[in-house]
Image (spheres, rainbow, N blue to C red):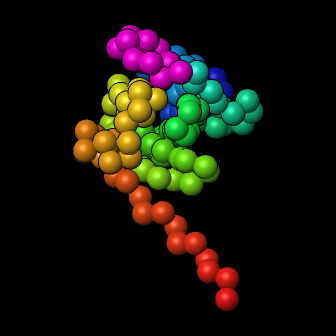
Amino acid sequence: MSDVSSALGVRLYPDLVEAGGLASALAETAARHQLDVGRVTAPEQGRSRFTCAELTSEPGTVCVGLGSQARYFMIDVRVAGQVQARGDATDLAQVAQVVAAWRGGATLGDLAARFPFMEACRPAPVAQAS
């Protein structure tokens, strides 16, 4: 069994195994649907090089991971390192649509309105100095 097969699980993600991992599958899906997601990167070592994808743009970073017990894609939209929106999608094309909308200038509210599986997160409270 190859590294990518054992990292992803052929049963849940056969298409990602065939593509060589989440990052390359996401880039291929975006290209097939003519969506601008920018450069898709993944960690260089370890299991996460097959199971994680990151897309950095002016407004912030979108991080994508995989469900381990069922097929779904976990999406975190981060601004200045803080998760500002998150959601779970079952279709990789939906993930690419979220990223393209974010890169295209959609606000966090726009993402939540356009993609029912996304929700804006409340910012963490800032500690007050006493």
On-image quarter of the N terminus = top right
Q: Verify whether residue 66 appears in magenta.
A: no
Residue 52, horizontal then vertical, whole percent: 57, 36
Figure quadrant of residue 101: top left
Residue 22 vertical placement versus 118 (above, below): above
Q: Verify whether residue 29 appears in magenta.
A: yes
- Position of 91 with respect to 51 (left or right) is left
- Position of 74 with respect to 129 (left or right) is left
Name the residue rendered at 64%, 37% in the picture.
48
- Position of 90 with respect to 42 (left or right) is left
- Residue 80 visible in this rendered orientation of the protein: yes
Span shown in magenta = 25-38
- Residue 87 visible in this rendered orientation of the protein: no
Seen from the viewer's position, the closer of residues 101 and 42 is: 101
Residue 45, horizontal then vertical, whole percent: 74, 33
Residue 116, horizontal then vertical, whole percent: 25, 45
Name the residue rendered at 58%, 21% in the picture.
39
Name the residue rendered at 72%, 36% in the picture.
46
Residue 119 vertical placement versus 107 (above, below): below
Name the residue rendered at 56%, 33% in the picture.
58
Q: Residue furthest right?
A: 45
Seen from the viewer's position, the closer of residues 59 and 15 is: 59
On-image quarter of the C terminus = bottom right
- Position of 109 with respect to 56 (left or right) is left
Seen from the viewer's position, the closer of residues 64 and 2 is: 64
Q: Residue furthest bottom?
A: 130
